[in-house]
């Protein structure tokens, strides 16, 4: 058998740590990185790398395997459950047989730290409330402006028109009546 794989984080040119890397913020995908054993330790041609995944949940326990090409140095496990714990091991396989398993990696409650939003705590609705109120105020202002801009000028009724005409004529009527009274 060959020597075991070496589990890594990141790429080989960086300082290495033994751990998985969270791939995305859905908290359900994990990318594993590893380093292949030296070629001199391979017992024949490399065939596959087996990824042994053991899930231990509240109501269920099971083991399953994923296989990847022997030349790969990473693999993303997808669709992981959040309510249990995982033990993950890698096995390097060649046509001469399977190598030993890596030390199990244990994942408890897969979590990704998320940045705190601008409004404060993670579940704080303050920012959303401010945005909604501002949007409502803006809509009201726009509607009032459009109403005032587009409203037709009010038409006068026939009674108002007659009253206006009388008011416009009255000063002349008074002047005429004063002139007539002077002439007498």
Image (cartoon, grey):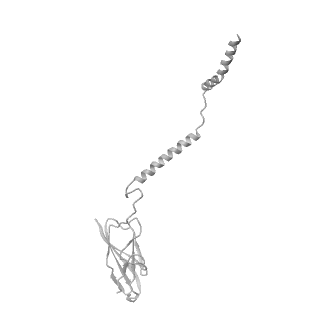
The front one of 160 and 102 is: 160
Question: Relative to 148, is 121 above or below?
Answer: below
> In the figure, is residue 60 to the left or right of 144?
left
Q: Position of residue 145 (x, y in %)?
A: 55, 42
Residue drawn at the location 41% of the way across and 83% of the way down: 47
Residue drawn at the location 63% of the way across and 23% of the way down: 167
Q: Position of residue 34 (x, y in %)?
A: 39, 79
Quarter occupied by residue 99: bottom left
Quarter occupied by residue 45: bottom left
Q: In which quadrant is the C terminus drawn?
A: top right
The front one of 83 and 157 is: 157
Farthest residue to the left: give it: 58
Residue drawn at the location 68% of the way across and 12% of the way down: 181
Q: In which quadrant is the N terminus drawn?
A: bottom left
Farthest residue to the top: give it: 184
> In the figure, is residue 116 to the left or right of 144?
left
Quarter occupied by residue 35: bottom left
Residue drawn at the location 67% of the way across and 18% of the way down: 175
Q: Position of residue 17 (x, y in %)?
A: 36, 77
Question: Relative to 138, is 24 above or below?
Answer: below
Q: Position of residue 104 (x, y in %)?
A: 31, 76
């Amino acid at each position: 058998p060959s020597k075991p794989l070496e589990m890594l984080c990141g790429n080989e040119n960086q300082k290495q740590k033994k751990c998985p890397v969270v791939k995305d913020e859905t908290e359900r995908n994990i990318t594993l990185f590893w380093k292949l054993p030296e070629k001199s330790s391979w017992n024949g041609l490399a065939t596959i790398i087996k990824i042994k995944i053991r899930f231990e949940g509240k109501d269920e326990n099971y083991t399953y395997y994923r296989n990847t090409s022997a030349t790969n140095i990473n693999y993303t496990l997808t669709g992981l459950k959040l309510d249990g714990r995982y033990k993950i091991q890698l096995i390097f396989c060649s046509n001469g047989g399977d190598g030993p398993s890596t030390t199990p990696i244990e994942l408890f409650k897969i979590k990704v730290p998320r940045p705190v939003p601008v409004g404060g705590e993670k579940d704080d609705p303050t920012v959303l409330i401010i945005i909604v109120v501002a949007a409502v105020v803006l809509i009201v202002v726009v509607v009032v402006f459009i109403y005032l801009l587009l409203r037709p000028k009010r038409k006068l009724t026939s009674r108002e028109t007659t009253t206006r005409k009388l008011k416009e004529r009255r000063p002349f009527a008074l002047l005429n009546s004063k002139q007539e009274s002077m002439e007498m």
